[in-house]
Image (tube, rainbow, N blue to C red):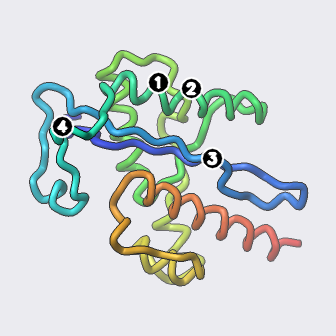
Amino acid sequence: ATDALLEVAAVLIGMNKERNLFCQNTIFTHVRPFVGANLEPASLEVNGIDPFHPLRIALTEKDALQKIFKPVREHVKLNKCTRAILVGHNAFFDLGFINAAAERAGIKNNPFHPFSNFDTVTLGALAYGQTVLSRIVEAADIDWDNSSAHSAMYDAEKTAAVFCNVMNKWRQLQA
């Protein structure tokens, strides 16, 4: 509720004819911190974001969330669902940021289920005995670039790839 959302990304998941999940499309935007937002110096050091860089094209929280929510809603409708389920690495934390930003922006039709989520920390521990995203990705034999880590888009794409990988392996084991 007090910390700035500086980037947001969503990866839409598809299913092929063999019923395997895959990363279909990524939506991303930079977000302008709201007035009075906490900007944690240690976090800015890790993610390398300068929230006030003059060349950083950032949207307000409301515009950023609408940019993300619109294609998510369309994907939900196309797949005959009622809500999207957020998949994240420490998903409860991510969902909290999204819900707080949506509330601040006055967005009433958040497409994400308010509390249900899939957490790749848990899935990674189960499938690979790892809880750190980079280690899960490497154990899943997915490419990892440490210099790209901690950006919303990169982390979302890697988290989605892990989710698809684990779910597809589980489905194969059930066959």
In this view, 106 is above or below 53: above
Side of 137 where 23 appears, left or right: right
Where is residue 51? Give x, y as percent: 19, 42
Q: Which residue is mark 1?
A: 66
Side of 44 where 138 appears, left or right: right
Q: Which residue is mark 3?
A: 25
How far apart marks 2 and 1 lie (CA) works out to 6 Å
The reply to whether dot 1 and dot 3 touch (C-beta < 8 Å) is: no
Sequence order check, earlier mark of 4 and 3: 3
How far apart marks 4 and 3 lie (CA) works out to 28 Å
Sequence order check, earlier mark of 1 and 3: 3
The reply to whether dot 4 and dot 3 touch (C-beta < 8 Å) is: no
Quarter of the rendering occupied by the C terminus:
bottom right
Where is residue 174? Give x, y as percent: 83, 72
Q: Closer to us: mark 1 or mark 3? A: 3
Which residue is nearer to you in this view: 84 or 63?
63
Q: Which residue is at the far front? A: 55
Q: Amino acid at mark 1?
A: Gln
Tell me what residue is drawn at x 18 percent, y 56 percent.
43
Q: Amino acid at mark 2?
A: Lys
Where is residue 21? Give x, y as percent: 74, 58
Q: Which residue is mark 2?
A: 70
Q: Amino acid at mark 3?
A: Asn
Question: Could you classify mark 3 by the number of other residues whose Cα lies within 10 Å: few (under 14), some (14-19), or many (20 or more)?
Answer: few
Instruction: Identify the mark at residue 54; answer none if there is no mark.
Output: 4
In this view, 51 is above or below 166: above
* Secondary structure type for disc 1: helix
Side of 100 where 162 appears, left or right: right
* Secondary structure type for disc 4: loop
Q: Closer to us: mark 2 or mark 4? A: 4
Tell me what residue is drawn at x 78 percent, y 52 percent.
15
Q: Amino acid at mark 4?
A: Pro
